C-alpha cells in the first residue's frame, strides 16, 4: 500500500490554449507523458466542461495507471491547472517515474507560479494513537 502522491497547482500558465480547452488533445498528450515516464496506462477518460456566457469550459483528463492514476484539471479563465499523480509502489518504487510525469506535464503548461506537494502514503504506522478505528468518534 506504500506510494507517492504528488500534486501541483499551476498558475499563470503561458501554454497554447488548446491544452486548457481541448480534452482530446490534452488526453493524448497525457497518455504520451505517461508512456515517456515509463508508467502503464490501463484506462482513460477525457471530458470537456461546457462553456458559459462568463467563462470557457475547462477540461479534465484522467488516466488510470497500473501503478494508480493521473488527473489533470484546467481552468482556462484563470490560466490555471491542477495536476495529481499517485503511484503505489507495489512491485517496485515508481517515485522517479511519478516525478518525471509531473515534470513533463508542468513543462507543457509553462506556469509562472507552481505550488507542489509530495505525500508519502501507506508507510509503516509507528504511532498507534494515530490510528482511528472505523466508526469511532474522535473526542
Image: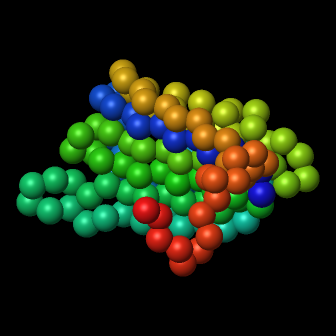
Seen at 30% across and 47% down, the residue is: 75
Task: Evaluate whether residue 61 shows in this view.
Answer: yes
Residue 39, given in percent of the width and then of the height, sits at: 77, 48
Above or below residue 32? Residue 117 is: above
Image quadrant in which the N terminus is located: bottom right
Residue 16, given in percent of the width and then of the height, sits at: 38, 35
Is 2 on the left-hand or right-hand side of 78?
Answer: right
Image quadrant in which the C terminus is located: bottom left
Task: Evaluate whether residue 34 shows in this view.
Answer: no
Seen at 78% across and 48% down, the residue is: 124
Q: Residue furthest top?
A: 112
Is 123 on the left-hand or right-hand side of 45?
Answer: right
Quadrant in the picture for residue 97: top right
Is 125 on the left-hand or right-hand side of 102?
Answer: right
Above or below residue 9? Residue 12 is: above
Q: Residue furthest front?
A: 139
Seen from the viewer's position, the closer of residues 117 and 78 is 117
Above or below residue 67? Residue 15 is: above
Residue 128, given in percent of the width and then of the height, sits at: 70, 53
Seen from the viewer's position, the closer of residues 4 and 82 is 4
What colour scheme governs how the chains and residues are painted in the rendered image of this protein? rainbow
Count of residue discs: 0
Q: Residue furthest bottom?
A: 135
Seen at 42% across and 27% down, the residue is: 114
Seen at 53% across and 54% down, the residue is: 71
Amino acid at each position: 500500500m506504500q506510494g507517492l502522491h504528488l500534486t501541483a497547482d499551476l498558475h499563470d500558465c503561458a501554454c497554447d490554449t488548446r491544452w486548457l480547452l481541448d480534452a482530446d488533445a490534452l488526453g493524448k498528450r497525457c497518455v504520451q507523458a505517461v508512456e515517456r515516464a515509463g508508467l502503464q496506462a490501463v484506462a482513460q477518460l477525457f471530458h470537456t466542461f461546457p462553456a458559459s456566457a462568463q467563462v470557457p469550459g475547462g477540461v479534465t483528463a484522467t488516466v488510470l495507471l497500473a501503478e494508480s492514476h493521473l488527473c489533470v484539471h484546467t481552468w482556462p479563465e484563470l490560466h490555471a491547472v491542477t495536476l495529481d499523480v499517485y503511484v503505489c509502489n507495489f512491485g517496485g518504487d515508481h517515485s522517479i517515474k511519478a516525478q518525471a510525469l509531473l515534470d513533463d506535464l508542468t513543462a507543457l503548461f509553462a506556469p509562472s507560479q507552481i505550488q507542489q506537494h509530495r505525500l508519502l502514503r501507506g508507510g509503516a504506522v509507528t504511532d498507534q494513537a494515530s490510528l482511528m478505528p472505523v466508526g469511532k468518534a474522535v473526542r
